[in-house]
Image: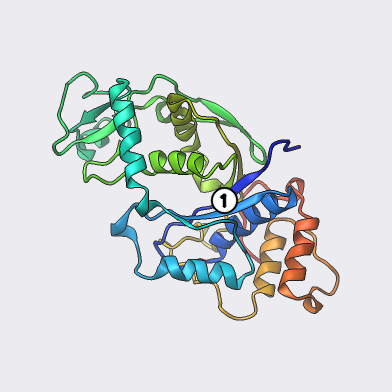
Amino acid sequence: MFTSPYIGRFAPSPSGDLHFGSLIAALGSYLHARSLGGQWHVRIDDIDPPREVPGSARRILTMLEHYGLEWDGEVVWQSKRHQAYRETLDWLHRQGKSYYCTCTRQRVSQLGGTYDGHCRCAGHGAENAAIRLVQTMPVHSFDDELQGKFIADTALAEEDFIIRRRDGLFAYNLAVVIDDHFQGVNHIVRGADLIAPTVRQLSLYRHLGLPEPGYVHLPLAVNAKGDKLSKQNHAPALPAGDPRPIIVQTMLFLGQSLPECWQDLTLPLLLRWAVAHWSLKKVPRSVSIPQ
């Protein structure tokens, strides 16, 4: 049972329109938050301009509204949060918890894909350099409320991972931790494709001395080939017609029961019923093909 005020969120990246896989994470996080009487925030994770699709952020927000997923408070845009990221990087640097790294992807690839700490004591300057965390608090496992105990790959957990890229863009692991803390998020429901890097985010929480959220990683929807439904795999955008059949399809994917004669319910009543009957215990753990 969640005892403190529950604060959850949905944080899509504007690299394309919402699709069925996105809706699983959005609806799952929404229903879980509302079933616990909690808040549900929306954040646009727009920290990687080269991957952004013009106009997709606004279309994402419009589609969330169309599907009845109303959020609390103002939408947070990561593109407006750069000062907070810089302040955190400065603090880590002053504490001796980060360093500049000039190693190329090619060098790391030749090592087998895991960075070896080559630049940790090199004393490089900021020019043409990434910033890496000095990993002194690795997290090797954590308890996911749906998936159970997740045990991380040792190399992933113990690596000095990048917190600011060589091109000056802020790393996802850094931004997501800072912004979730800023928004007061204490519970995160998202897709299982993000479960592995969670140990890095938990490690960063500990390095920064911040309270750690709880996690639920939902099953992924895949196509007939077994590929995750994603923007990169050209998953079709959510339709703009009657949202109720897609909401019902998503509820079924998440293992939830349906009201009798749901076709007679308005969208608000359907969502209200879904909130009242939400059960995390019914959600399957593994990936599946949407029916």
Tell me the quarter of the image containing the C terminus: bottom right
Residue 12 seen anywhere in this rendered image of the structure:
yes
| The one of 224 and 165 positioned closer to us in this rendering | 165
Name the residue located 15 percent from the left edge and 29 percent from the top edge: 125
Residue furthest to the bottom in view is: 241
> Where residue 253 appears, x then y in whole percent?
68, 60
Color theme of the render: rainbow
> Where residue 285 appears, x then y in whole percent?
66, 46
Residue ID for mark 1: 9
Name the residue located 39 percent from the left edge and 44 percent from the top edge: 172
Name the residue located 41 percent from the left edge and 68 percent from the top edge: 56
Left or right: where 36 falls relative to 13: right
> Where residue 240 appears, x then y in whole percent?
56, 78
* Vertical placement of residue 33 versus 2, above or below: below
Residue 116 seen anywhere in this rendered image of the structure:
no
Name the residue located 78 percent from the left edge and 77 percent from the top edge: 263
Q: Secondary structure at mark 1?
A: strand
The residue carrying pointer 1 sits among few (fewer than 14), some (14 to 19) or many (20 or more) residues within 10 Å by Cα, namely: many
> Where residue 96 appears, x then y in whole percent?
30, 20
- Please give the count of numbered marks on the rendered protein: 1
User: Which kind of residue does numbered mark 1 sit on?
Assistant: Arg
| The one of 227 and 99 positioned closer to us in this rendering | 99
